[in-house]
């Protein structure tokens, strides 16, 4: 482990030891480190640069920089009709953190509650199809909890990788979920990063879902500026783009996915074969109810890349991959 000698010993012990704890306590962790704040990516540069460039293959922190662009009109590939007919649902989410609070790996009960109070005011600024209701984990009724769980909206704070880095400290204080009236725009509050902005709907209208996500992220940003009086509110870096606790989400902080029914392809080449195809196209396959879940007749296809490419490129990655996988399914004789 290489550490900048200029960092005071106490800072290394308290911050870097926390940052690598998820990997130390969970040897099966894919990456094994989390950041505590924006400065972590500079102060512990040798550690994080190695992790970032290893995970985000092709990204060079010396010569490249991330650019955010959520313009739906720049998507250059259309979803084929044969692919759209097989898609059950589409979901695209992005992570955002507030620049004037520590990341939740180093957050406190007080900081999480402050974020929740602040965001409650921001939610009141949302209008149109983005308007909705904010539910706090500490004040939801049993009926509300059951409804949100049954709809697969609610997060539970039971991820051991996140827990090892302090994400779940003081659970459930300061946590909550915002749900729009039409249930197509959601936000998780202090689940991992400060904000997990989610756009989703049944079917395969990917441009509609992506457009809503972009409008939602922009509306939240404007609401934060209005409520706080600050000019900049999202935590970002000129090279790394949007800052997240986990280096795997740097840049866009975005994961777009579709659940697609492909029973014949699953039977012929198996989940591993489908994932191999997806990986060759900068995407990945997962079980339809999450990573490592059982695969029967459908899979989750999502973008793999996060950093160094604008959001519309990553959505296009997913569309291209889904088109190919759908075509492979159609070419198999019953």
Image (cartoon, helix red, strand yellow):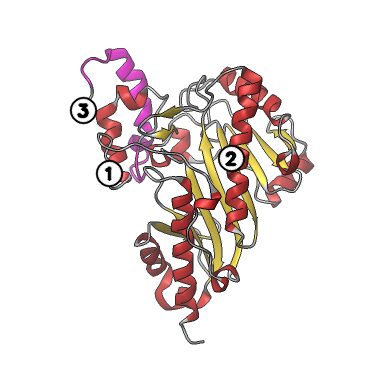
Q: Is residue 328 above or below residue 232?
A: below
Task: Please state which of residues 179 and 17 is positioned toward the viewer in this rendering.
Answer: 179
* Neighbours of disc 1 within 10 Å: few (<14), some (14-19), many (20+): few
Mark 2 or mark 1, earlier in chain:
1
**In the rendered image, which residue does mark 1 sit on?**
54
Q: Position of residue 93 (x, y in %)?
A: 55, 45
153, 67: nearer the viewer: 67
Helix, strand or loop status at disc 2: strand
CB atoms of marks 3 and 1 within 8 Å: no
Q: Label 1, secondary structure: give it.
A: helix
What is the x, y in percent for residue 171? 59, 29
Residue 2 shows which numbered tag? 3
Q: Quadrant of residue 186?
A: top right
Q: Which mark is residue 197?
A: 2
Q: Nearer the viewer, residue 328 or 188?
A: 328
What residue do we see at 41% from left, 36% from top? 246
Q: Is residue 331 above or below residue 285?
A: below
- Residue 29 picture quarter: top left
Q: What range is drawn magenta here?
A: 4-32
Q: How many marks?
A: 3
């Amino acid at each position: 482990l290489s550490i900048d000698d200029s960092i005071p010993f106490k800072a290394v012990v308290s911050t870097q030891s926390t940052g690598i704890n998820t990997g130390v306590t969970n040897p099966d962790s894919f990456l094994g480190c989390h950041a505590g704040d924006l400065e972590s990516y500079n102060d512990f540069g040798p550690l994080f640069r190695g992790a970032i460039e290893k995970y985000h293959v092709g990204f060079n922190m010396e010569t490249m920089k991330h650019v955010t662009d959520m313009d739906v009109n720049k998507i250059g590939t259309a979803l084929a009709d044969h692919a759209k007919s097989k898609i059950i649902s589409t979901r695209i989410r992005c992570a955002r953190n507030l620049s004037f609070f520590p990341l939740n790996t180093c957050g406190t009960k007080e900081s999480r509650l402050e974020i929740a109070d602040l965001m409650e005011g921001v939610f009141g600024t949302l209008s149109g199809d983005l308007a909705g209701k904010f539910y706090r984990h500490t004040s939801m009724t049993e009926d509300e909890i059951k409804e949100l769980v049954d709809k697969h909206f609610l997060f539970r704070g039971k991820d051991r990788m996140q827990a090892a880095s302090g994400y779940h400290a003081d659970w459930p204080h300061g946590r909550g979920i915002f749900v729009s009236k039409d249930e197509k725009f959601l936000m998780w509050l202090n689940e991992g990063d400060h904000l997990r902005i989610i756009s989703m709907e049944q079917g395969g209208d990917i441009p509609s879902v992506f457009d809503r996500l972009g409008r939602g992220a922009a509306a939240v940003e404007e609401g934060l500026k209005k409520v706080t009086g600050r000019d900049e509110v999202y935590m970002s870096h000129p090279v790394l783009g949007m800052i997240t606790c986990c280096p795997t989400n740097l840049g866009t902080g975005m994961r777009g996915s579709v659940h697609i029914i492909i029973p014949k392809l699953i039977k012929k080449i198996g989940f591993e074969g489908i994932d191999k195809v997806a990986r060759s196209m900068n995407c990945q396959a997962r079980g339809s109810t999450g990573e490592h879940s059982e695969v029967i007749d459908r899979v989750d296809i999502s973008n793999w890349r996060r950093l160094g490419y604008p959001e519309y490129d990553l959505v296009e990655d997913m569309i291209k991959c889904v088109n190919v996988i759908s075509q492979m399914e159609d070419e198999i004789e019953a």
